[in-house]
Image (tube, rainbow, N blue to C red):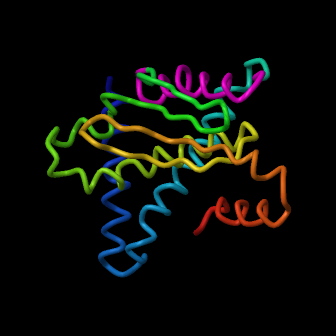
Amino acid sequence: MADEALFLLLHNEMVSGVYKSAEQGEVENGRCITKLENMGFRVGQGLIERFTKDTARFKDELDIMKFICKDFWTTVFKKQIDNLRTNHQGIYVLQDNKFRLLTQMSAGKQYLEHASKYLAFTCGLIRGGLSNLGIKSIVTAEVSSMPACKLNSHFLKMFLTGDPWVAQQFSACLKPRV
């Protein structure tokens, strides 16, 4: 229980620290989300490497996403994802109806516009984990009512195996920006 509280406090301090540096002019305000996502990306890479070192290889993308929803999410957030949906074409939607990083905020709609900055790290966490498992993806989050959130993961392998120009464009958008 103590480690959960420390994680929540650390996450809140990371978000406020990045946004305070933007207010002081050290970082452009528009780059705050990117900076938080890049932090999550690196953490996600390290965690997946550690969590999967003794596991068997995954059969397919669905197996990887099940691992993310059960084992990875449980280790990081102390609960499984509530719902996983897919169209079997590289798009996965993970739904958490009581997301821990948003439960500290009001359940009303007054803080909805601030939710994206508290979800950027988590988007990076998933993207980094998937990246270390060999899957390039774009992960976005949406919140319609607090503290529930939906994380959309779009796998890019279908784009990266076709036209070289398209592959270059998508690869460029996935490179971490510092």
Which one is nearer the viewer's eye here, 19 or 120? 120
Q: Picture coordinates of residue 174 (x, y %)? A: 65, 59
Image-quadrant location for residue 144: top left
Q: Picture coordinates of residue 82 (x, y %)? A: 41, 22
Q: Residue at x 24, y 35 (%)?
A: 103
Residue 122, above or below 64: below
Determine whether, in the image, residue 9 is placed left or right of residue 105: right
Image-quadrant location for residue 133: top right
Q: Total label count?
A: 0
Q: Does 70 lie within the magenta span?
A: yes
Looking at this view, name the residue that lies furthest to the bottom. Answer: 25
Q: Does 43 lie within the magenta span?
A: no
Determine whether, in the image, residue 150 is placed left or right of residue 50: left
Tell me the quarter of the image containing the C terminus.
bottom right
Residue 63, above or below 133: above
Tell me the quarter of the image containing the N terminus.
top left
Which one is nearer the viewer's eye here, 133 or 23? 133
Q: Picture coordinates of residue 33 (x, y %)? A: 43, 61
Q: Residue at x 44, y 52 (%)?
A: 120
Residue 166, above or below 107: below
Q: Residue at x 75, y 26 (%)?
A: 60
Which one is nearer the viewer's eye here, 170 or 39? 170
Q: Residue at x 30, y 76 (%)?
A: 23
Q: Main secondary structure of the magenta part?
A: helix
Q: Picture coordinates of residue 171 (x, y %)? A: 73, 60
Determine whether, in the image, residue 32 is placed left or right of residue 152: left
Magenta region: 58-79
